[in-house]
Image (spheres, rainbow, N blue to C red):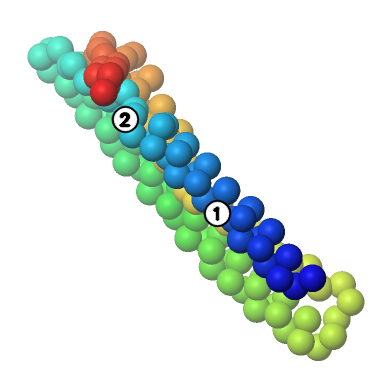
Amino acid sequence: MLEYALKEFWETTVRKLAIAIILAVLFGCTSAPKKEYVAPEDPSVQECIGDCQSNKTQCAAYAHDQYRRCRHDYEYRERVYRDCVARGGTFCIKPESCKPPRTSYCQDQYDGCYQACGGIIRTIEPEAG
């Protein structure tokens, strides 16, 4: 019985691994489109784009700060949870982990700001391999 279970587990694991490798080869080798940022030479446009960059930097710093605060709070709640479990508590609440900082939002905001200032963003599709 144990031999059959191990054989089935092994075959299932190998099958899943093979599928994962095939999918990685098929889809993992394509690169994402790249962006090319073209800014007019106008000083007011340059200043505006500089403000966009400052806002992006502040946005990313805020996202990372929020994540650090969440991690600090999570570590405290995790200790409380472990203490509760160790004491045999019935209503111990396992804390949820923190989601990584979402800085893609900052990039999207930057792109919108960049274009509002008069800059142009071109999408460059990768060459087919």
Using the image as rendered, state which of residue 22 and residue 24 is in the foreground: 22
- Rendered-image quadrant of the N terminus: bottom right
Kindly identify the amino acid type of the residue bearing the numbered disc 1: Val
Q: Measuring from the top left, give residue 7's x and y in whole percent.
A: 66, 63
Q: Residue at x 70, y 80 (%)?
A: 82
- Rendered-image quadrant of the C terminus: top left
Q: Which corner quadrant of the image does residue 11 belong to?
A: bottom right
Number of on-image labels: 2
Residue, disc 1: 14
Secondary element at image label 2 = loop
Instruction: Give the farthest residue toward the right.
Output: 90
Please, is residue 72 above or below residue 56 in the view?
below
Q: Residue at x 59, y 66 (%)?
A: 73
Kindly identify the amino acid type of the residue bearing the numbered disc 2: Ser
Q: Residue at x 81, y 88 (%)?
A: 87
Q: Earlier in the sequence, mark 1 or mark 2?
A: 1
Circles 1, 2 touching at the beta carbon (< 8 Å):
no
Residue, disc 2: 31
> Position of 58 compared to 120: left or right?
right
| Res. 123 in view | yes
Q: Measuring from the top left, give residue 92's x and y in whole percent.
A: 81, 73
Disc assigned to residue 62: none
Secondary element at image label 1 = helix
